[in-house]
């Protein structure tokens, strides 16, 4: 088969995220309501801020501004994780970063499958935050063994999804017919099942050990547990959710509201209790319920350097020493005030962030730079000072462990807090994944460096 008859991985990913959005809106009507609210707030924000609209029009695809940016699943076994890696690779999504959630009382560790490289991210940035259950953190050995048996018996991928993944690996891509089939076959893995895999008794035991264990082990597959569109004003959506009859989580995760947004801010509506039937030992179906699925929104800011990230972690920690956000929202105001106060030392101008070496920037020629022809200056700082080069924030494309823990917790029910001994195990995760995860900082540093080199080359003909 000729290579040029393949559908690009970016196009397959776009088709997949669009299909997932349609499916999830049908499955969880409250999510459709959230999407409407997000689109409305985005429209209002753009109407009130023509400059922002102009900028987004130049740098992003404005017509897709309110689309999903990520989703999340929780897997049960190493084999599921390894196969999922191969499936996502067909869509140009690769594992970036390692997140240990055990410290936050959630028995999983995770990575984000996402496109890498500027062009792929621009085309469609859809990511899937993918967690692997850690039964090793469960104290009850009998229950652990039973859970392993249940998980080993399930096959979360359709035969078609496996076959087409193998075909894509063998041939180097999929043609149009196969790509369409691939999307619909893979979608099956993410579908909700209202008939559980386990008895009411087993569900209760799993649930008593940890709600998350019940969520992973009790079902035929790793249903998508949320999708997350992009909002241009997260504070407004958070405030408006109750008017749309959806219950927001207590606080927005991540940094406070700022003039120059950093990293990632997220919030969600609380997971819904949904009817599920469980098969009893005598074969009869018993009605019950399960709470797992929700909707989330995100607003992204600049990617921070290791130095910036260390400062972020330190300030977040300091704010949480003053006030820990309560799950019921009773101290949300105090938390917001403490957070805003704690972040005062973090510069809030782009120039300040750049000069302090806290964030990653993409450099480009100014109008003057484009007209200047050749410059004798070889140093990027001198070129900026001469007005020949400008800089723009590089957007953070990854996740934050403390925020992810907050999203997990608020959707596991208010009383679900449980302590585990911190036990990050990236080596184990990578062995299960069958690959090493990419380092997020390398990615941003690479984009920054390439932009510097191309400016210098354009102005001097020299290599930086
Ligand atoms: C994943 C929670 C983490 C995020 O946006 O930080 C996450 C989950 O609940 O499975 O999606
Ligand atoms: Ni999320």
Image (cartoon, rainbow, N blue to C red):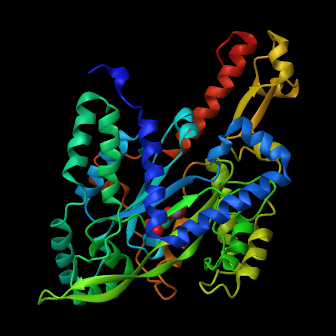
Q: Name the residue nearer the viewer: 113 or 220.
A: 220
Q: Residue furthest left?
A: 282
Q: Name the residue nearer the viewer: 250 or 347.
A: 250
Above or below, comparing residue 4 to residue 417 in the picture: above
- In the drawing, does residue 450 fall left or right of residue 112? right
Residue lying at 40% horizontally and 78% vertically, measured from the top left: 420
Residue lying at 28% horizontally and 72% vertically, measured from the top left: 219
Quadrant containing the N terminus is top left
- Residue 439 drawn at (x, y percent): 48, 44
- In the drawing, does residue 372 fall left or right of residue 28? right
- Residue 458 drawn at (x, y percent): 71, 14
Above or below, comparing residue 199 to residue 90 in the picture: below
Above or below, comparing residue 179 to residue 334 in the picture: above
- Residue 37 drawn at (x, y percent): 67, 66
Q: Name the residue nearer the viewer: 409 or 61.
A: 61
User: On the image, which quarter does residue 425 sit in?
Assistant: bottom left
How many numbered tags mark residues here? 0
Residue lying at 59% horizontally and 84% vertically, measured from the top left: 327
Residue lying at 45% horizontally and 54% vertically, measured from the top left: 128
Is residue 248 at least partly visible in the picture?
yes
Quadrant containing the C terminus is top right
Is residue 355 at least partly visible in the picture?
no
Above or below, comparing residue 115 to residue 213 in the picture: above
């Amino acid at each position: 088969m000729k290579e040029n008859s393949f559908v690009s991985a970016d196009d397959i990913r776009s088709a997949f995220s669009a299909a997932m959005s349609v499916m999830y809106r049908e499955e969880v009507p409250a999510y459709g309501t959230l999407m409407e609210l997000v689109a409305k707030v985005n429209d209002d924000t753009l109407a009130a801020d023509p400059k922002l609209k102009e900028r987004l029009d130049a740098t992003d695809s404005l017509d897709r501004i309110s689309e999903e940016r990520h989703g999340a699943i929780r897997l049960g076994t190493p084999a599921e994780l390894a196969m999922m890696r191969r499936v996502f690779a067909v869509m140009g999504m690769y594992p970036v970063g390692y997140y240990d959630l055990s410290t936050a009382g959630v028995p999983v560790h995770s990575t984000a499958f996402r496109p890498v490289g500027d062009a792929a991210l621009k085309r469609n940035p859809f990511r899937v935050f993918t967690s692997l259950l850690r039964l090793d953190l469960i104290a009850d050995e009998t229950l652990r063994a039973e859970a392993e048996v249940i998980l080993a018996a399930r096959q979360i991928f359709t035969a078609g999804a496996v076959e087409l993944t193998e075909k894509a690996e063998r041939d180097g891509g999929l043609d149009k017919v196969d790509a369409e089939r691939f999307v619909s076959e893979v979608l099956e893995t993410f579908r909700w099942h209202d008939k559980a895999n386990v008895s009411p008794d087993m569900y209760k035991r799993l649930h008593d050990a940890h709600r998350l264990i019940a969520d992973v082990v009790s079902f035929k597959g790793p249903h998508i547990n949320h999708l997350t569109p992009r909002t241009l004003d997260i504070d407004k959506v958070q405030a408006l959710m109750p008017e749309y009859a959806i219950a927001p989580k207590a606080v927005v995760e991540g940094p406070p509201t700022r003039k120059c947004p950093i990293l990632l801010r997220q919030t969600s509506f609380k997971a819904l209790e949904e009817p599920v039937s469980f098969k009893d030992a005598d074969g009869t179906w018993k009605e019950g319920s399960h709470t797992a699925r929700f909707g989330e929104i995100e607003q992204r800011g600049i990617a921070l350097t290791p130095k910036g990230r260390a400062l972020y972690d330190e300030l977040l920690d300091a704010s949480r020493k003053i006030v820990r956000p309560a799950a019921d929202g009773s101290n949300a105001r105090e938390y917001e005030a403490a957070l805003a106060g704690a972040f005062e030392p973090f510069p809030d101008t782009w120039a300040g962030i750049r000069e302090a070496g806290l964030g990653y920037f993409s450099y480009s020629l100014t109008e003057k730079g484009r007209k200047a022809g050749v410059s004798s200056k070889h140093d990027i700082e001198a070129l900026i000072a001469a007005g020949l080069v400008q800089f723009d924030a590089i957007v953070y494309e990854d996740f934050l462990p403390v925020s992810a823990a907050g999203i997990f917790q608020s959707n596991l029910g208010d009383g679900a807090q449980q302590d585990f001994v911190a036990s990050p195990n990236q080596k184990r995760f990578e062995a299960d994944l069958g690959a090493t995860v990419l380092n997020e900082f390398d990615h941003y540093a690479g984009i920054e460096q390439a932009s510097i080199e191309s400016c210098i080359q354009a102005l001097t003909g020299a290599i930086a």
